[in-house]
Amino acid sequence: MSNTAAAIDAFITEVTVITTLPLVPELQLRLARHAHDIFQDAYTFVHGGVGARPYWAFAWPGGQALARHIIDHPDLVKGRRILDLGAGSALAGLAALKSGARAVTAADIDPLAAAAARLNAELNDVVITATTDDLLGHDTAFDLVIVGDLVYEPDLKDRVGSFIASHHARGIPILYGDRSTARRPHGSFRLLAEYEAPLTPALVDNFIERARIWQLV
């Protein structure tokens, strides 16, 4: 049986703590209370189904870098309809809303991530649209696509690469945030900025990564 929306909200509230990130102090997120335990907690909650990997409970370096870059360059998002693809906690999408975006859709196939995006939006006094639809392979109608740390499996490299290439070909700008140890999708990227950002909460103590912002060209 699927968990109800109320049960999902209660679970997220129980296993997270409200956190402010040093790189993005303008925003608050509900992040994992216990960085390692959250994986077993989520697996048990969803009985091994979709949502067993709680990526939404962490602020990944690429997402932190995107959020920082957007807040520092609000002209990138002001008045635009934004797709936060593979949104997780929706950190980058929240930064866009705080920076004047017209609307943000946080897309993540994990229903816990969609709920976390909504709860994080409430924390930051903004309204976000969350969807669990798998948008990869579909054309969408947005003014800007932002993606952070999404290529964590080999098949995603191809699927994300095809998605952003098709949108770029239609004139839609693409911003991609990653960390130095991560993959990027296929495509020609121009480096816009670099930041230091630790995974939060940490899975390895005192490990700081270089997070980078790229634009598809």
Image (cartoon, helix red, strand yellow):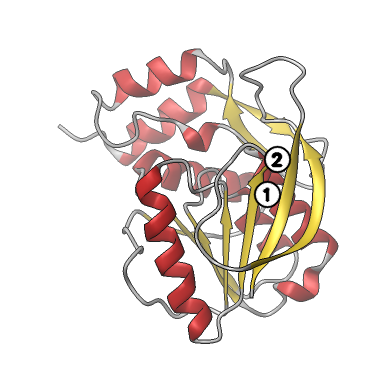
Label 2: element kind: strand
Residue 128 seen by the camera: yes
Residue type for callout 2:
Gln
Q: Is residue 86 left or right of residue 190?
A: left
Extreme-left residue of the structure: 1
Q: Position of residue 44 (x, y in %)?
A: 30, 18
* Relative side of 213 to 122, left or right: right
Quick one: label 2, few (<14), some, or many (20+) residues within 10 Å?
some
- Looking at the rendering, which quadrant does residue 34 occupy? top right
The residue positioned 37% from the left and 59% from the top of the image is: 159
The residue where tag 2 is placed is 28
Residue 3 shown left or right of residue 154 in the figure = left
Numbered tag placed on residue 124 in the rendering: 1
- CB under 8 Å between callouts 1 and 2? yes
Task: Please give the name of the residue rendered at 58% of the width and 41% of the height, measured from the top-left corner.
Answer: 182
x, y (%) of residue 94? 64, 55
Residue 97 at x, y percent in the picture: 66, 63
Can you tell which mark lies on residue 138? none
Decide which of 34, 3 is in the foreground and name it: 34
